[in-house]
Amino acid sequence: MTYTIEEHKHRFAAWAACRAASVNRCRFSVEDGKAILEEAGLNPLLIRNPDHLPNPRCFDAAHRQWREAVIVAARKRGLEDFTHGVAAKLINIYLKSRFVCGGHHNHARVRAIHPPIDSILLDKLYSEKSENFAKLQDAWRKAKHIRWSKFNSKDYEDLIQNIRLAMQGAALWEVEQYWQGYQ
């Protein structure tokens, strides 16, 4: 096997995603997480560049299919507590590492990639006093109360719709300006 930059990016993105998404009650190895992503169709053979990502109008439906495929693949490995929130975090960090942080942040299909959700972001969105986010304070409170790692499909999709509404047409990754986990 020839080691390519595509394989290198895939391995790094999978590692980052697995480390970020493995949480209490749903611990898994990087090896298992990488295999789960690949089984769900997130691999360098199928998604080589941003043009291979779903059209922005179809992204949410594709994301739902990926989450469902990730959950099925995880359960085959005995990971019964893999929720839509955990699956989404695994997918979103993977795509963020490959494409948002890979220099394609302004590509129309990359702008539709869902941001990774965690308690740090939800806490900040809930406490943010800016006009965009204060109008949705009840939505942020609800999401914060449920906890991202326990989201079912509807909880997750409702939150993404609220983020999209709050971002007013900006790339979804830009909501991470409120994420303080880098500090």
Image: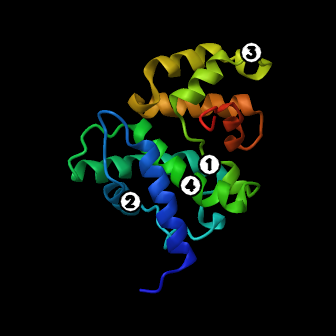
Amino acid type, label 2 = Lys
Q: Which mark is residue 113?
A: 1
The reply, left or right, for residue 19 in relation to residue 174 is: left
Q: Secondary structure at mark 2?
A: helix
Q: Earlier in the sequence, mark 1 or mark 3?
A: 1
Circles 2 and 1, Cβ within 8 Å, touching? The answer is no
Q: CA distance from mark 1 to mark 4?
A: 7 Å
| Nearest to viewer (mark 1 / mark 3) | 3
Q: Earlier in the sequence, mark 2 or mark 1?
A: 2
Number of numbered discs overlaid on the protein picture = 4
Q: Which mark is residue 34?
A: 2
Q: CA distance from mark 1 to mark 3?
A: 25 Å
Circles 1 and 4, Cβ within 8 Å, touching? The answer is yes
Where's the C terminus, which quadrant? Answer: top right
Q: Residue at x 31, y 42 (%)?
A: 27
Q: Which residue is disc 3 drawn over? A: 129
Q: Earlier in the sequence, mark 1 or mark 4?
A: 4
Q: Which residue is disc 4 drawn over? A: 95
Q: CA distance from mark 3 to mark 2?
A: 38 Å
